Image: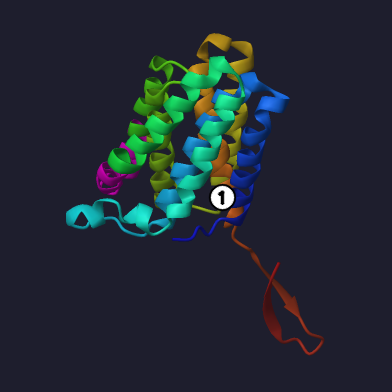
Amino acid sequence: MKGELKILGTAHGLLLGLVLASPLIAPSLLPWGVEALFIIAAFQLRLADRRWETRAGLQGWISHIRMAPLRLVPWAGTAVVALIAGPEQARLAAAILIAIAMSELLIYPVSAHLLGRLPRLGLAGAILLLLIGCGVAEQGQAARFVIAFALGMGGCVFWLRGPDGEAGATLAALAGAVAALIIALLWPVAKTVVIPAAILCLTLTLAHLSVMRRHPLHWRLPSGMRFMRFH
């Protein structure tokens, strides 16, 4: 199991480093950072796992874990960091461990098959419902992290079904991220919904940039022969 989006993978690694360092920088931002990790990690997992059908038996149910077991190690580190951040974050550490267990052992095996059968419009509707669920769930709780994980999975399938790498789609995703962040600043009461939306849109933007298509340009030799080159 190996991801292919270099820009998104780099951003994922940087975010993980910031989350691990957040107790020293800004402990109050730790729950938001963890939520972003759940969204991006689920996006990367759905992208890397090429299966769309669940294999029979227990080994098929957890085959996505067996293909890359070390992928779970950073979650343990994140939970430890939450404990180090202070007594008030002890509940956050428990929520991380509960959420990742539910996401990996239940949400992913069930949802991967179901999401693969939805059309793009249906995926957009599912994403909207998940964003509403983020608004209902309390920040820093296991239920919210599980919803964020499902949101990342849905976002990945939506991206795979769309015009990936096109300038128009990239700009649309970037505009969605900027609009969501502006709404979060102007209307703080909506941040529980618009911040996950901004994270997902930014993830889509980075995914598009990772596979941005090159446009052919024509050039001629002095002899008049015409060639194609890419830049």
Q: Is residue 216 left or right of residue 123?
A: right
Total marks shown come to 1
| Closest to the observer, 156 or 61 | 61
Name the quarter where the C terminus is drawn: bottom right
Q: Is residue 74 above or below residue 180?
A: below
| SS type, badge 1 | helix
Residue 185, can we see it? yes
Q: Residue at x 74, y 76 (%)?
A: 219
Identify which amino acid the numbered label 1 is placed on: His
Q: Is residue 82 above or below residue 38?
A: above
State yes or no: residue 13 in magenta: no
Q: Residue at x 47, y 19 (%)?
A: 91
Q: Residue at x 62, y 33 (%)?
A: 19
Magenta: main secondary structure equals helix
Residue 207 locus on image (x, y percent): 55, 49
Q: Is residue 68 above or below residue 201?
A: below
Number of other residues with Cα within 10 Å of mark 1, as a class: few under 14, some 14 to 19, many 20 or more: many
State yes or no: residue 124 in magenta: yes
Residue 217 locus on image (x, y percent): 69, 69
Q: Quadrant of residue 154?
A: top left
Name the quarter where the N terminus is drawn: bottom left
Q: Residue at x 55, y 39 (%)?
A: 77
Q: Which residues make up the magenta segment?
A: 108-125
| Closest to the observer, 159 or 113 | 113
Which residue in the protein does label 1 denote? 208
Residue 94 locus on image (x, y percent): 43, 26
Q: Is residue 129 left or right of residue 60?
A: right
Q: Quadrant of residue 136?
A: top left
Q: Residue furthest left?
A: 56
Q: Is residue 72 above or below residue 55?
A: above
